Image (cartoon, helix red, strand yellow):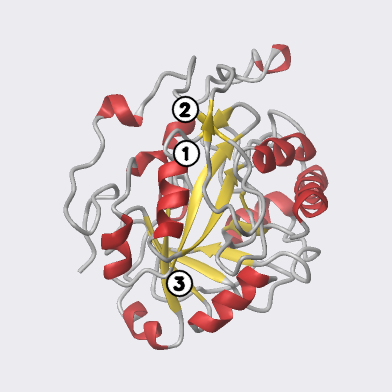
Amino acid sequence: MLSTSRSAGPTGTAAPSKSRRLPLLGALAAAVALVTGVTAPAYAAEPAPAPTTGGQADRHLPALHPELDFAGSTVAANEGRASTAGVAALAATQTPGLDVSSYQGNVNWASVKANGARFGYVKATEGTTYTNPYFAQQYNGSYSAGLIRGAYHFALPDRSSGSAQATWFVNHGGGWSRDGRTLPPALDIEYNPYGATCYGLGQSAMVSWIRSFSDTVHARTGRYPTIYTTTNWWSQCTGNNGGFGTTNPLWLARYGSTVGTLPNGWGYQTFWQYADSGTFPGDQNLFNGAYDRLQALANG
């Protein structure tokens, strides 16, 4: 049975209080430093400068609420939800996992693993000012529990360049190491939670922004980022560009019993976010293959 609470974990742990979910934008308790090397999976916290909305050029833009933005936070409102009946049958050939953000607070990863999850993506950053204050607990905790984990960035293409946001991401959690337990860094590019669907960018400009982000992550980590999106958003905002399918794994969001039509350029999805609540905290996902294929993806 799917639960009705996005933030309740499989053990029924209460959701973080409003004050914990909505920290002031003017300060963060801690930020985190880039994971490097296969022998150092832990992600250590260190003091960070107070985040801002992005400087002089952003004064006309709405104030940010990054603690409310996560992979799929805009999907249901724009595309709705459908029945996920039949998804469970895919567990024999696909591998279950989840994604979380600061919205979930501290996650009981041992319970998540016991309930069948084998991988997790964790929100690390947004724009060029925000870092998830729960990132260290979520990223390190999933690793310690035996999950294959990865980090993702929530894109704000109207705030700064793709290269600038990729640099912020890699410097604050979006790294990769060939330890067999770290997924490619991921770019969450979806409906704008602050205004115009495509962030005020034309289709060619959006493609250029994504390309800049992708190339910078590749230059810094050796891996092209997984791209999280929906077919509808991709079609509208990139003109259904087909230029990323040969390099970037697809993490498709569609809340229903099938993945449906894929964005141009991809012949299959690598990950499928099929529901925004369920057995695990946060969003419910399937990797399109058996566990050994997931390990192969982690190893590059």
Going by the numbered disc 2, the residue's amino acid type is His
Q: Residue sitting at 63 percent across and 42 percent down? A: 34
The crowd level at tag 2 (other Cα within 10 Å; few <14, some 14-19, many 20+) is some
Secondary structure at numbered mark 2: loop
Residue 292 showing in the rendered view: yes
Image marks 2 and 1: residues in contact by CB distance under 8 Å = yes
Disc 2 from disc 3: Cα separation: 28 Å
**Residue reaching furthest bottom?**
92
Quadrant, the N terminus: bottom left
Q: Nearer the viewer, residue 82 or 268?
A: 268
What residue did someone put label 1 on?
Answer: 69
Going by the numbered disc 1, the residue's amino acid type is Asp
264 is higher (above) or lower (below) than 72 = below
Disc 2 from disc 1: Cα separation: 7 Å
Disc 1 from disc 3: Cα separation: 21 Å
Residue 160 horizontal/vertical position (percent): 73, 30
222 is higher (above) or lower (below) than 65 = below
What residue did someone put label 3 on?
Answer: 286
Residue 70 horizontal/vertical position (percent): 47, 44
162 is higher (above) or lower (below) than 298 = above
What residue did someone put label 2 on?
Answer: 65
Going by the numbered disc 3, the residue's amino acid type is Leu
**Picture quadrant of residue 285:** bottom left
Q: Residue sitting at 73 percent across and 16 percent down? A: 57
Residue 105 horizontal/vertical position (percent): 33, 40
